[in-house]
Amino acid sequence: MKPQILIFCFMASLLAGCHITRSSPLGYDSLMNGFEAASPVQDQALAMPENADPFKYTFEGRLELLDEATGGSARILRGGEHLEDEAQHLPEFDFEFVQCGSYLVPVRRGLIITDHPVWNIILEPGRLWQQKNDRGLSRASFPFTLVVKGGNSSFNGAMTFLFDDTHVSRVWYQVTQETATSLHIDLWGLLEAFYHPGPVAGAGQIRQRFEQEMRERFPTKPIQQLAVDYPDVDIDAFSRHITPEHLTTYGVIVNGVDYRGNCPTRYGESAYCDWIRMASFSTAKTAFVSLAMLRLGQKYDPHIADRLVRDYVPEASTSPGDWSEVTFDDILDMATGNFASSGFMVDEEGRIFEEFFALDDYAGMIRVAFDWPHSAAPGTRWVYRSSDTFIAVQALQNYLQSYEGADADLFDFVVREIYQPLELGPGFFTTQRTIENNWQGQPLGATGIWWIPDDIAKLTTFMNVTHGEANGEQLLSRDILLRALQADPNDRGVDRPGGKYNNTLWADLFTTADGFDCTFYVPYMAGYSGNIIALLPNGLTYYYFSDNREFDWHAAVREADKIAPLCPVGGE
């Protein structure tokens, strides 16, 4: 191991903390001998305490759980009327981990496709430490996220256990928070486990990449510090509009710092707020699909927005609609002219929800996506339709393959060309796809990525502050990006109820009637469950993720104006 990596990895383990004295329901006797649990415990019982002692043992190898299909308990809190019994239990768990100082790092990151009928899983790095009354054993915990198979909703939890060089205790797990509209559920249990210690292939490289990942984390401060750094700001304005029990997290990104809000669960503050995975829903339309076109435009073709969809998606020829003049720009503006109803969300929350999203194969989904009549000239009428984004992904992918060959994949292109240069973590490098090849088919695009706050901070700074430049290189088509950000008064996009829509970004209008001295737009990404990522024209980003479909966020804009005036930057 290189000296600088060695220093990083063992820095945390050299802390000379005091012994832990707090009581915990997950003590030595509970984890070694078992106990009856009527519910999850407080999430902080799975967190490494601030004054933890350095670990004694090193963990490297496989952690295997037993009886996942029958062990554990569940409590359905919302929805679940048609939920399979298997959803009350974990998928099979047998995964490799390596250790980097006091961090426990899963070898596989991002979405892992399982054999479970309901759940896939995402693993994130955890921690290791020593705790009083554990009789000399070391203690570990790590966060994980369950993702509905073929879906986007995320259910967040953590696991914890004791270990030495050769054995582990039982493993306690619990899921206590989600970003999901139709299902809320608690899961918890204590499972027998095996530790298979041994060298992990590529362990040195995994540690090296993790060290780089941690070094590049976006600077953070607690949201309370925002009121100290900017005394006129009412920080409650950034969260009071969200029902607390439905909030995943929120933050305000100011001058290179993410002022981070809390991450509540039904059992107290999350043990792993930094690593909590939040379902994107339609924020993926911007973070993936729009950025794909902007990168293709910068790298290959400045006129990419004017290319015709019909030239790149052969299924357009059999559509009952008219795709003869629909451009890439039109489809990302939700203005193809092919729709059944122009009513707000009538197509989207009707047949698209009921039929398009009920399918999981490419052939079926592309058929439904094109099975709509011609109702308006392209570029003239905004009608929100996630199935059109699926068509856009196929058009952009086939366009990419005309340059990079038949094996080129649009999402992998975005990972390579944008996410990796921005130092986003590997948990962001997978996406929801169609079912072919064990769920490795075509990217959906309309939904299907999972954010942590660090991803949001890096990606929005890249878009809203450096305007597509990273490491001294312009990665995105600046002209198209500025139009999407409402910085070009000659191209606002398409009218929609309450504002504009341009290249997957919504935009709301603020005027003197809202208490400002000028008129300006705030572009933003929006997700169905109640997710907002607002890219303010003063360079700030405000975001929140929730799951009660609450979208009343304008009070945050008024507070952001106190931090950096909006009118001199974004006014007209």
Image: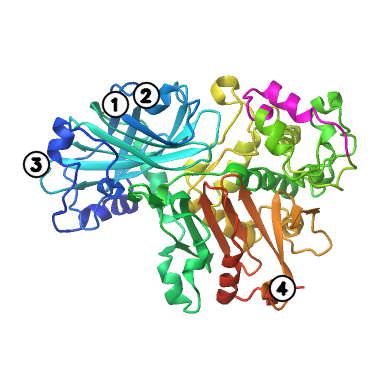
Give me the disc on residue 513.
4
In contact (CB < 8 Å): disc 2 and disc 1:
yes
In contact (CB < 8 Å): disc 2 and disc 3:
no
Q: Position of residue 559 (x, y in %)?
A: 56, 71
Q: The residue under label 1 is which amino acid type?
A: Leu
Few, some or many C-alpha atoms within 10 Å of disc 3 (few <14, some 14-19, many ≥20)? few
Q: Which residues are magenta?
A: 355-375
Residue drawn 73% across the image and 56% down it? 484
Few, some or many C-alpha atoms within 10 Å of disc 4 (few <14, some 14-19, many ≥20)? few
Q: Write down the quadrant of residue 572 in the picture.
A: bottom right
In contact (CB < 8 Å): disc 1 and disc 4:
no
**In this rendering, would 24 be left or right of 258?**
left
Q: Write down the quadrant of residue 460 in the picture.
A: bottom right
Few, some or many C-alpha atoms within 10 Å of disc 1 (few <14, some 14-19, many ≥20)? many
Q: The residue under label 4 is which amino acid type?
A: Ala
Residue for badge 1:
65
- Disc nearer the start of the sequence (4/2): 2
What's the CA distance linking mark 3 and mark 1? 23 Å
Identify the element where label 4 is drawn: helix
- Disc nearer the start of the sequence (3/4): 3
Identify the element where label 2 is drawn: loop
Identify the element where label 1 is drawn: strand
- Disc nearer the start of the sequence (3/1): 1
Residue for badge 3:
135
Q: Position of residue 552 (x, y in %)?
A: 60, 58
Q: Is residue 366 magenta?
A: yes
